[in-house]
Structures are given as structure tokens and as C-alpha cells.
Image (tube, rainbow, N blue to C red):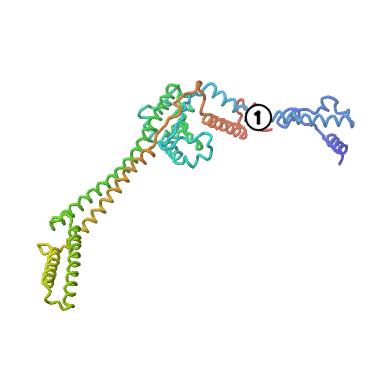
Amino acid sequence: MTNEERIRKWQEKRAGEAQPEPAFGPGAPRFAPRSERVAGPDTGGFADGLDDARSDILDRRRQRWRLFLRRFGLFVALPLLIVLLYVELIATPLYQGEAVFTVQTSGEAAPSPNAGLFAFGSAGSTIADAFKAREYILSRPMMDYMERRYGFLSHFDTYRMDSLTRFRSPLGFNRDPFDYYRKRVRVAVDVQEGILRLYVQARTQQDAVRFGNAILAAAEQHVNQASQKISDDQISALTQDVQNAERQVADTRRSLAAVQAQRGDLAPEQTAASIYQLISQLELQRAEAQRERDSLLDQGLTNSPLLPRLNARVSELNAQVAEQKRRLASPGGTSLQSTLTQYEGASSRKDIAQARWQSTLNTLQQAYLRILEQRRYFVIIVGMSVATFPAVRDLLGIAAPLLILLALIYAAVFALRSAGVTVPGSRRLRFGS
């Protein structure tokens, strides 16, 4: 269908209308067609009809644009204006203090800023300690300490704070102390560099510095106490091992002394060794004398003057060997071998206890060095400093209640208009077309 056919049908439809719509009333059109305002009903024609159609299209576009502007102003511009006015005229600006710190050991240095991701592996313990410090700063015990010692939450529970950002607001907002504390205190962790940034908000610069320094001091004390407790526990356990080893050494020494007192010899093993060595030498001499005597007898020299002397020598050596073997038995009847076995057992136990004591002592000394190297230190890199000018911090906390309130007002007005109730001033707030 061409445009000329559409225009002709539109003209026929208009010509077939019997009665014009009323100019006023609920069903009245919002504007009169340009053909009725300019040319009149009798000045028809193709050119006039085309102008009327164009005029009607332009009027509809203008109406849509005015409707869009009204809705934009009502639902976008007006809420933003109300929020901005509240922020500029009513909301309480707060100062924010900032400090930079880290937790590290004496055996490691802070990661280089140029190290990037390569420093993450070497600074793993530093990052873990940093997160532990962050969790303590943002914990309920820290909140209770700050409120009890410095009145941190009470600092925001005052008429000097606006109703939407005040702690325990009369409007029912900010009732949870812990959530409000974590809103005013934040800790950011830089994983790459292993540092932490503490942010503390307050109504004045002096209070921001005071609260920030108090949190840093409490966190430093907590890190030092935790590090000291770990060191004390390790040293206590190792010291207990050393003391047990010392007692064991003393017990084995007493046992060895008892064995020595029983035998009456300070070194039974040396005595037994010397006796066995002497017996061996005597047996060798006896064997040599017997060999010489047997040689004379084999040669038939029974009347040799050397034979009596050799017999006496053999008898003397036999007596000496028997005497040394009798020395292996103690006067009480206990053999020297049994005493030697007891002595060797006691001496071995003493040596083992001595070695264990020396090992535990070396472990304790190494633990001291390791504890000194791994001791945690709370290092403040940049002290607490405060911005020169305050700013409104709770933009979301301010905007959300205001927008919800406006939405409830709009919904109530729309519901009343839909029910046919006339709301004063609502005719200027057009929700529909």
C-alpha cells in the first residue's frame, strides 16, 4: 500500500466521523488537529490532508517527548536532587585518617615495590601475618576495646551526626554496633607489596588521629603478645626436654657409680682388659718354657741341668695364670665378667643419656636462633595522617533510604489515583500517558 492510499483512507475515515469529540471532559483530546485550527473542515484536498497528517505526527512526537521529560524529572532528576541536597545541606562530613604498616620477621625484609608477583612466594608468611593483623583490627574484641577505652562508637552517637549516618539513628538505622564499626574502620591489604593500609573515620581530625593511633597500638601489642606466646611455648617445651635429659644423665651416672662401688674399681673394663692381656702374655711364656722342656726330653737329656729350671719356670707360670684367673672373680663371689657386663650397660646408658642431653641442648640453642629470626614485628611505615578536608562517606547509606522513601510515596500516590481518590498536587505528578 502506497502513502497516497494510506492518506486517502485516513481522509475517508475522518470524513465519515459523524460527530466531533468534545473539546473538554474526560474523553477530550489533548490537542485539536492542525486542520481544524487552520484550514477548517471545508478546505479539504490532497495537500491539506497531507499537511494535517504531518501536523498530527509532529504533535504526537512532542507529546511523547514532554511525557518522557516529565517521567525523567519525576523518577530520576528529582530523587537525585533530593539526595544531593541532603548530602550538601544535612549529611555530616567525616575526616578520614590513613596509616600504612606491615608485619614481618627480623630474618626477612619487606618485599621490593618492583618485585611484583615474584615477591609473593617469598613473602607468604608476611601476607599471612598481615591478614591475621587485619582480622584482629576488624574483630569484635577490638571494637569492644575501642569503645571501652576511647568511646569510639559513642563518638558517632550524637546529635552532631545526621539522622541517616548516626550510630543508633532515631530513624532505626545503624543499630548493629559491629557493622557500624567496620563501616568506620577499614583495612586494605596490598598482596604484592605485603603492606596494610588502615582507614579510620571521625568527626574531627584530632579524633581520627587518636582513634587510628589507638588501633595501631592495640594491634602492635596483639602481634607482640602472639609472637611472644609462640616463642615461650617453644622454649618451654625444649627446656623441659633438656631438663628431662639432664635428669636421665644424672640417673645413669648414679647407676654407673653403684656398679663401680660394688666392684671397688673405677674402671672394671680396663682392669679386665689388663688381666686378660697379662694372662695372654703368661700363657705365651708358659708355652715357650714347655716347648724348651719338651725339646730336651725329646733329645733324651733327662739329666740336663736346664730341665729342673724349665720345670720350675712352667710351674711358676701355671701358678701366675691361675692367680690372674682367680682375680677375675670378686671377693664376694661375683665374677668380674658379670660386673663388667653391668658396668658396660650402665656406661652405655650414661653415654646415650649424655648424647640425648647434648642433642636437646643443641636443639634448644638452634631454637633460640630460629625464634629470633622468625619473631614477628609490627612495623609502622607511615604514621596516622588525616585528610585536610572532610567528606560525606556514607553515600550509599544516605541514598538508599531516601530512594526507598520516594518510591513508597510514589506508590502511595499511584495507588490513590488508581482508586479514584484526588490527591492534592498529584495532577502535576503524571505517572501515565
Q: Amino acid type of disc 1?
A: Phe
Q: Nearer the viewer, residue 380 or 34?
A: 380
List the residue tagged with mark 1. Answer: 72
Relative vertical location of residue 82 with respect to residue 280 in this rendering, above or below? above
From this viewpoint, is residue 231 visible? yes
Residue drawn at the location 35% of the way across and 29% of the way down: 148
Q: How packed is label 1: few (under 14 Cα within 10 Å), some, or many (20 or more)?
A: few
* 312 in relation to 411, above or below: below
- Give the quadrant of the N terminus: top right
Q: Residue at x 12, y 56 (%)?
A: 264
- Location of residue 26 (image quadrant): top right
Q: Quadrant of residue 105?
A: top left
In this rendering, the answer to whether 87 lies above or below 291 is: above
Is residue 173 shown to the viewer in this render?
no
Q: Could you tell me residue 347's position as x and y percent?
A: 22, 55
The residue lying furthest to the left in this view is: 331
Left/right placement of residue 284 relative to residue 133 reads: left
Q: As displayed, is residue 340 above or below residue 138?
A: below
